[in-house]
Amino acid sequence: MQSSHGASPSQLFDPDLPTASAVLVSLSCVATRYAMNPSEDLALLGCSLAQTLNAPEYAESGLITSAARQLLREWRDLLQAHQTFAMQQAVSEFVTPSATLQ
């Protein structure tokens, strides 16, 4: 829902997704794909859409606002888990097995 005061849209608002429902449908599609094949790219996309849903233009109700905050926290946690795992993998490539046994 865009502001009727003529103010310019916030930086989070996506004109290609004009309503909270449109953002939620997109987020649902990403969540389904993520559930079938988790990846950092999908976690990043989910996080981005959840952040978009937090734009004031989508604050159609308290429920949407609350859900948007919760979804953003959850997608950020998933993204962080992927990034942490990737960092651990990179570190383990530099540590030789013999060095860890000594």
Image (cartoon, rainbow, N blue to C red):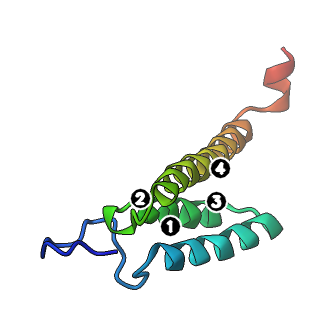
- Residue placed at 74% from the left, 71% from the top? 32
Element on which disc 3 rests: helix
Sequence order check, earlier mark of 4 and 1: 1
Residue nearest the viewer, comparing 40 with 57: 57
- Residue placed at 73% from the left, 37% from the top? 92
Element on which disc 2 rests: loop
CA distance for labels 4 and 1: 14 Å
Sequence order check, earlier mark of 3 and 1: 3
Q: Is residue 3 left or right of residue 36?
A: left
What amino acid type is highlighted by mark number 2? Asn
Sequence order check, earlier mark of 2 and 1: 1
Specify the label residue 54 is tagged with: 2
Instruction: Classify mark 1: residues with Cα within 10 Å, few (<14), some (14-19) or many (20+).
Output: many
Element on which disc 1 rests: helix
Q: Residue furthest left?
A: 6
- Reading the image, the residue beneath label 3 is 40
What amino acid type is highlighted by mark number 4? Leu
Sequence order check, earlier mark of 4 and 2: 2
Instruction: Classify mark 2: residues with Cα within 10 Å, few (<14), some (14-19) or many (20+).
Output: many
CA distance for labels 3 and 1: 14 Å
- Reading the image, the residue beneath label 4 is 78
Nearer the camera: disc 4 or disc 2: 2
Nearer the camera: disc 3 or disc 1: 1
Q: Quadrant of the C terminus?
A: top right
Specify the label residue 49 is tagged with: 1
What amino acid type is highlighted by mark number 3? Glu
Residue nearest the viewer, comparing 68 with 14: 68
What amino acid type is highlighted by mark number 1? Leu
Q: Residue furthest top?
A: 102
